Image: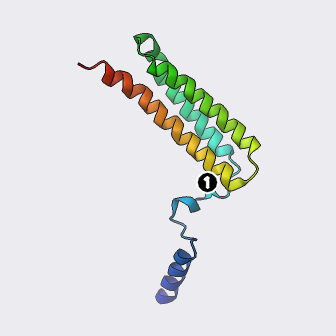
Amino acid sequence: MGAAQNEDDRREFRDGEDPTRMANQPALRTSSGAIWLVVGAVFVVICLVVLIPLVPLGNPAPLVGAVLIVLLYAAMIVVRFAVHRRIARLRTLAVLLGLIAVIGLLAVLIPTYASTP
């Protein structure tokens, strides 16, 4: 039984069906995209809660970051309902969510390091 299982695992890997590959995760293959909008909304709220208090400190990075984050989330909503091909829609939503996280991080780090002597 062990040898047969190993052969099945190798065959799956050769066929590109390895379930441990990032591209084969259910959120990128079978989801409707609604979960990406929910997680994106959580990311946006967290980012805005952190960035909005930084706006009055004078550096424009938090304000620019907050605006970009809101625009990226709006793009997520548009992609969710406008892109009909499932794989393309889910991968685009994943990229947009990643951009929200990266821009949120940069919008906090830029003023932090800009103010240090």
Residue 67 percent location from the top left of the image = 56, 23
Q: How many marks?
A: 1
Residue at point 62% right, 33% down?
Answer: 73
Establish if 57 lies above or below 110.
above
Establish if 11 lies above or below 111.
below
Establish if 3 lies above or below 30.
below
Res. 60 image quadrant: top left
Instruction: Name the residue tied to disc 1.
Output: 27
Q: Residues within 10 Å of mark 1 (few under 14, many from 20)?
A: some
Residue 117 percent location from the top left of the image = 23, 18
Looking at the picture, the colour scheme in use is: rainbow
Kindly identify the amino acid type of the residue bearing the numbered disc 1.
Ala
Q: Is residue 87 left or right of residue 49?
A: right
Q: Secondary structure at mark 1?
A: helix
Residue 79 percent location from the top left of the image = 70, 41
Question: Hey, which residue is sitting farthest left in the picture?
Answer: 117
Residue 109 percent location from the top left of the image = 37, 28
Residue at point 65% right, 58% down?
Answer: 29
Res. 30 image quadrant: bottom right
Residue at point 65% right, 50% down?
Answer: 90
